[in-house]
């Protein structure tokens, strides 16, 4: 909710806010789960979402794969 609030408050200053979910990443924390994505895939997906960020989609909650996540 903080991200949505920031997006609303900062839009008039032309500052866009992204709310990002990195996905299930194969790390020690997830015990390198076979169903996860690599850290490199996660980072690339997050960078792609940031590149797509505009004032029109500010405050959107995105998965690293581009899926818009519901609240």
Image: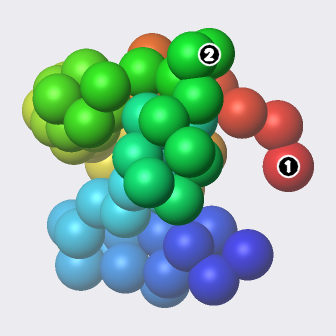
Tell me the SS state at disc 1.
Answer: loop
Disc 2 residue crowd, few under 14, some 14–19, many 20+, Cα 10 Å: few
Residue 40 image point, x, y percent: 17, 29
Please report the residue visible at 48 percent of the width from the left and 69 percent of the height from the top.
Answer: 7
| Quadrant of the rendered image containing residue 17 | bottom left
**Which of label 1 and label 2 is nearer to you?**
2
Q: Which residue is mark 2?
A: 35
Please report the residue visible at 85 percent of the width from the left and 49 percent of the height from the top.
Answer: 71
Whole-angstrom CA distance, mark 1 to mark 2, is 23 Å
Residue 58 image point, x, y percent: 43, 51
Does 6 appear above or below 71? below
Residue 6 image point, x, y percent: 50, 81
Q: How was the colour assigned to the protein in this rendering?
A: rainbow
Q: Nearer the viewer, residue 37 or 32?
A: 32
29 left or right, relative to 51: right
45 left or right, relative to 44: right
Question: Label 2 near label 1: C-beta < 8 Å?
Answer: no
Please report the residue visible at 72 percent of the width from the left and 33 percent of the height from the top.
Answer: 69
Please report the residue visible at 48 percent of the width from the left and 35 percent of the height from the top.
Answer: 32
Question: N-terminal of the two: label 1 or label 2?
Answer: 2
Please state, as top left, top right, bottom left or bottom right, where the N terminus lies in the image: bottom right
Does 67 appear above or below 58? above
Q: Nearer the viewer, residue 39 or 53?
A: 39
**From where the camera sits, is residue 10 visible?**
yes
Q: Which residue is mark 1?
A: 71
Residue 29 image point, x, y percent: 53, 59
Tell me the SS state at disc 2.
Answer: loop
């Amino acid at each position: 909710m903080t991200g949505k609030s920031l997006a609303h408050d900062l839009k008039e200053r032309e500052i866009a806010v992204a709310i990002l979910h990195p996905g299930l990443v194969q790390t020690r924390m997830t015990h390198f789960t076979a169903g996860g994505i690599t850290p490199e895939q996660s980072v690339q997906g997050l960078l792609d979402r940031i590149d797509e960020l505009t004032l029109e989609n500010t405050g959107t909650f995105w998965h690293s794969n581009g899926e818009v996540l519901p609240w």
